[in-house]
Image (cartoon, helix red, strand yellow):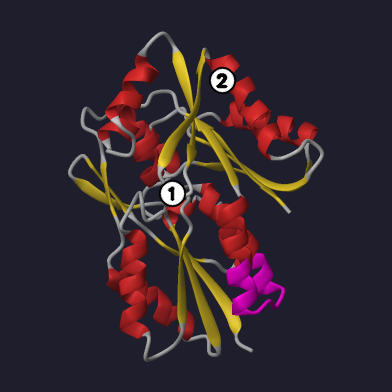
Amino acid sequence: MGRVKVITDSTADIPAELIRELDIGVVPLKVHMGGTSYLDGVTIKAEEFYRKLRESSELPTTSQPSPIDFVEAYREAAKEGDTDILSIHLSSALSGTYQSALLAKSMVENEFKVTVLDSKKASFAIGLIVVEVARAAKAGKSIDECVALANRMIEKEQVLFLVDTLDYLQKGGRIGKAAALVGSLLNIKPILSLSDQGEVCPVDKVRGGSKAEARVFELLREKVAAGSRVIAGVVHAERKAKAEEWADKLRELYEVKELTITDVGPVIGTHTGPGVVGIILYAE
């Protein structure tokens, strides 16, 4: 039985220490701003990105890795010998990254085996899955066991998030104009999630930020009973204090096995804007 090497893309927003600890391969997407192209998480980090975003009059754009970028990552992983590669990526409803990975798989299928999964998620909602699968791989689980775990998490993971403004999602084509209009009226704060197809979707609308936060935790309790044993993540863009507050609330509500607080990186931040804060929850 071969070892399993887990590869993802930079939109998983996994903290660098976990990437190193679990030997996760990361293929970066690109952010284009101010006439310069940056590798997400490599040549531009979250802090610098949000500073540039505030200073820029133009909305940045993003682009997916090429199939060749994935081929290079897969061949590098295959050098380690008897290796099964499991490649888990950003929702295909939000990006062509998954399609690039599939094309790369077809280009190396005569050399070694690659399994490519559409996470139907974004940011650390991908990352939480990748981290747990990489832990399973490190513990000696087979490729079939790792794929089964990934699919189980994709199906059961809960994702809820708030944004300061829907303008970035609307301008980037990730949410409809009608939803953006609602968000601008009367201090209505939409609570957002990701659909089963991996699209950004509104779950509820609440007037006022503090009421919206309270509603997020109500919705969580409806999905995952208080006291459940969970693995969790809290993501944020320049809202670390709020993220830590939400993490404390999660620890009060649930038996938290693992909890990771992480930045929303440049590519996802291009589409959410600064000020986003969100929760990812998986009940074991």
Residue drawn at x 37%, y 62% is 98
Residue drawn at x 56%, y 43% is 262
Give the residue furthest to the left: 35
Crowd class of label 2 (few under 14; some 14 to 19; many from 20; radius 10 Å): many
Residue 220, horizontal then vertical, whole percent = 66, 34
Q: Which residue is mark 2?
A: 212
Residue 271, horizontal then vertical, whole percent = 35, 38
Which numbered dot is residue 198? 1
Q: Nearer the viewer, residue 33 or 235?
A: 235
Of marks 1 and 2, the one in the foreground: 1
* Residue 128 is a magenta residue: no
Mark 1 touches mark 2? (CB < 8 Å)? no
Tell me the magenta residue range.
134-148
Q: Main secondary structure of the magenta part?
A: helix
Residue 10, horizontal then vertical, whole percent = 43, 55
86 to 205, vertically: above or below? below
Q: Nearer the viewer, residue 165 or 91?
A: 91
